[in-house]
Amino acid sequence: MNKISIIVESILAAGVAALFILFFTYNPWAKKSANAEVEAQGDLLPIAVVNTDSILTHYTLAVESSDKLQSQYEESMVKLDTKAKAFQKEYETFQQDVLNFQKKVEAGAFLSRERAESEQSRLQKKEQQLAAKQQDLENLRQQLSADFMNQQAALTQQLQDSVQAYLRELNADGHYHLILNDAVLMNKVAGYDITDEVVEGLNARYAK
């Protein structure tokens, strides 16, 4: 279960990490003086930093969506496992039938050649049916995996769109020229991190 969660979070993190390398050059819709950003924060440059790991941990949309996706995947795997166990039991029964057939042939236990051929034909058809079922199980496993990956991609895109929309809303006045994911920074300087503000704003908007 933890492994699935880690997979989901890692993919979401990758998507959001790319999102936050955003360049907000001068906003043509904003009306402010040339030095407004300096006046607002003293010597701080018009740059903001966001911790994407913190967003994934505290953004309600990310948490709920990840939990839902994980739950759906686990339910699908349980159903697949049930089908696989039923197939395994049926296959073991078939193997025993084949073994019994071979013993009867060797012992000459069949009353006629026709009875032996009829049983052999039945076993051959059963073998073909089992091969088809095995292929169906493999196809289902691949489909579940593909669906999971597609859902992860859709969730990543949903999260990207949500966060990007909020950042543009937050930066409507063009105050920040650059918003970075702190994972790309070699050195961090106090005063630029707006993660808490972003998380609070995202959750407030999501709760509406």
Image (cartoon, rainbow, N blue to C red):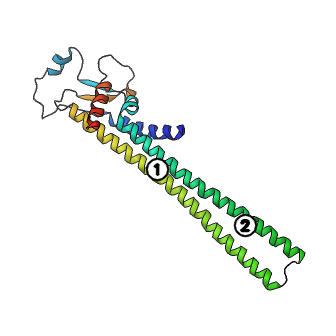
Going by the image, does 137 lie left or right of 152? right
Q: Earlier in the sequence, mark 1 or mark 2?
A: 2
Q: Does 201 sit left or right of 72 as displayed?
A: left
Quadrant of the drawing holding the N terminus: top right
Q: Which residue is mark 2?
A: 94
Instruction: Name the amino acid, label 2.
Output: Phe
Q: Quadrant of residue 35?
A: top left
Residue 90 percent location from the top left of the image: 68, 63
User: Which of labels 1 and 2 is toward the front?
Assistant: 2
Q: What amino acid does circle 1 point to?
A: Phe
Residue lying farthest to the right in this orientation: 107
| For residue 43, side relative to residue 125 (left or right) | left
Question: What residue is shown at x 12% (from left), y 31% (from top)?
Answer: 30
The quadrant holding residue 50 is: top left
Q: Secondary structure at mark 1?
A: helix
Tell whether 159 sits left or right of 40: right
Q: Which mark is residue 148?
A: 1
